[in-house]
Amino acid sequence: MSPIEDPDNLDIVVMNIVEQVMRYQDPFWCLYQRKQMIYLFQFIKRFCKTIISNNLYQSFSLSVIILNSITIALYTDKGKTNIPFFDAIDPYFLKIVSSEMLIKMTANGIIFAKGTYLRDKWNVLDFFVVMTSWINIYFPNLLGVSLQALRILKPLKMISKQKKLKVIMFALFNAAPQLYNTIFVIIFCFWIFAIAGL
């Protein structure tokens, strides 16, 4: 048996996507241009991964969420004491968190592969908050229902930024089934006092 045919003498070489593209050949048109587009996309993808892994960028993103949460807390409904400054600054917060979402989607993929953006439940929450915010801007009374109340979901994005908060939330969710009886007793007591107050 020749060395080439001997399985023990075969070396397995793991190539990244760029090396695979360089070695790829086919008889179809625009092969060079297609390879260049893949190179460009891989460069953008690596650049986006560098951004989201940067500690300075993560601190900036968390600061934006905290400031946005403060403005939501200070914001009051129209017809009351409404501050125009909050209406003017809110779209800028939305653009920042939307750009962060797009950067993460570019770096990790959207949904199909393992480890992509929408495979993470906390990212699904972020996606829902961002999309409802855009819908509230362009379709404020979609189906006759105002989505303004969904602004209160924006501070929940802070959970996806802090691993310790995730641990606390998971602990609360896991403990919820054990608290059913306690919650029922509390609701029953509130109900009795509500009837007595009438």
Image (spheres, rainbow, N blue to C red):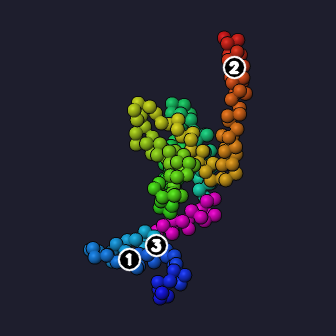
Residue depth check, mark 2 versus mark 3: number of the one nearer the observer? 3
Q: In this view, does 185 lie to the left or right of 161?
A: right
Rendering coords of residue 39 (x, y %): 42, 73
Tell whether label 3 touches label 2 (CB within 8 Å): no
The C terminus sits in image quarter: top right
**Disc 3: CA contacts within 10 A as few (<14), some (14-19) or many (>=20):** few
Vertical relation: 11 (above or below) 125: below
* Badge 3 or badge 1: first in the primary sequence: 3
Q: Which picture quadrant has residue 19?
A: bottom left
Q: Which residue type does callout 1 highlight?
A: Tyr
- Give the structural element (helix, strand or loop) at label 3: helix
**Disc 1: CA contacts within 10 A as few (<14), some (14-19) or many (>=20):** few
Residue highlighted by disc 2: 188
Q: Residue at x 34, y 72 (%)?
A: 34
Q: Which residue type does callout 3 highlight?
A: Ile
Q: How many marks?
A: 3
- Is 73 part of what is drawn in magenta? no
Q: Report how far apart the C-alphas of labels 2 and 3 lie in the structure.
A: 61 Å
Residue highlighted by disc 3: 17
Q: In this view, does 17 lie to the left or right of 174?
A: left
Does the image show residue 198?
Answer: yes
- Give the structural element (helix, strand or loop) at label 1: loop
Q: Report how far apart the C-alphas of labels 2 and 1 lie in the structure.
A: 69 Å
* Badge 2 or badge 1: first in the primary sequence: 1
Q: Residue at x 61, y 51 (%)?
A: 160
Residue highlighted by disc 1: 24
Q: Which residue type does callout 2 highlight?
A: Phe
Residue depth check, mark 2 versus mark 1: number of the one nearer the observer? 1
Q: Residue at x 72, y 19 (%)?
A: 189
Rendering coords of residue 184 (x, y %): 69, 24
Q: In front: 138, or 168?
A: 168
Res. 129 mark? none
